[in-house]
Image (cartoon, rainbow, N blue to C red):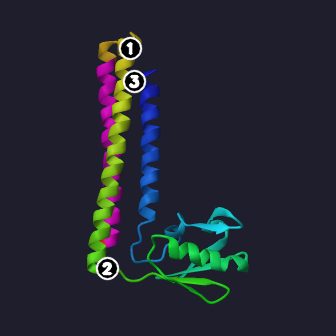
Amino acid sequence: MANAIIEKAQERFQQSHQSLAREFASIRAGRANASLLDRIEVEYYGAPTPLNQLASITVPEARVLLISPFDKGSIKDIERAINESDLGINPANDGSVIRLVIPALTEETRKDLAKEVKKVGENAKIAIRNIRRDAMDDAKKQEKDKEITEDELKTLEKDIQKATDDAVKKIDSMTAEKEKELLTV
């Protein structure tokens, strides 16, 4: 029973790491990356549809994204969705494809993005600590209900703390890696 608590916590830690990775992927680093467009939804025949289901997205050059719609009639809708998004990049439409030229980041923009990365990393750590608290509560409840002994509770708490420390280390390394990517010119 005790291992179930740790397994559940580790599964939730894993989900937090995946969520953080997705969040970091959407922060642009001055290089073209198709994941920048992952969160963009296009109003297509009245239904919000993810952009990557309406078009193929390629990276022909280091700082250019090329969006080739499967249905050429949706090109205006795609362009509108990009303009309304928080990307801050103007799409260039030549009638059959859309080009997004990713501007080089200024030093100030890099520092702002690095702060954003730190903030996102801190939020992920808060999520990890909340998971630890839930796991500790579950363990204490089991001890209170006489399902485990006091000694088993102490061991379980140590194991939960170790798993938490490992999860936080992983977040720290992911954050440091993304910061390094942003601050490298």
Q: Residue 2 appears at what percent x and percent y? A: 42, 22
Q: CA distance from mark 2 to mark 3?
A: 47 Å
Any part of residue 31 in sight: yes
Could you tell whether 65 is left or right of 167 in the image? right
**What kind of residue is marked 1?**
Ile
Check the image and name the residue furthest to the front: 46
Could you tell whether 116 is left or right of 35 in the image? left
Residue hosting label 3: 138
Mark 2 vs mark 3, foreground winner is 3
Mark 2 / mark 1, whichever is N-terminal: 1
Is the C terminus in the top left, top right, bottom left or bottom right quadrant? Answer: bottom left
Mark 1 vs mark 3, foreground winner is 3
Range shown magenta: 153-182
Residue hosting label 2: 185
**What kind of residue is marked 2?**
Val
Q: Nearer the viewer, residue 83 or 183?
A: 83
Query: Label 3 neighbourhood size at 10 Å, few (<14), some (14-19), many (20+)?
Result: some
Query: Label 2 neighbourhood size at 10 Å, few (<14), some (14-19), many (20+)?
Result: few
Residue hosting label 1: 148
Q: Secondary structure at mark 2?
A: loop
Rendered image: mark on residue 13: none
Any part of residue 61 in sight: no
Q: CA distance from mark 1 to mark 3?
A: 11 Å
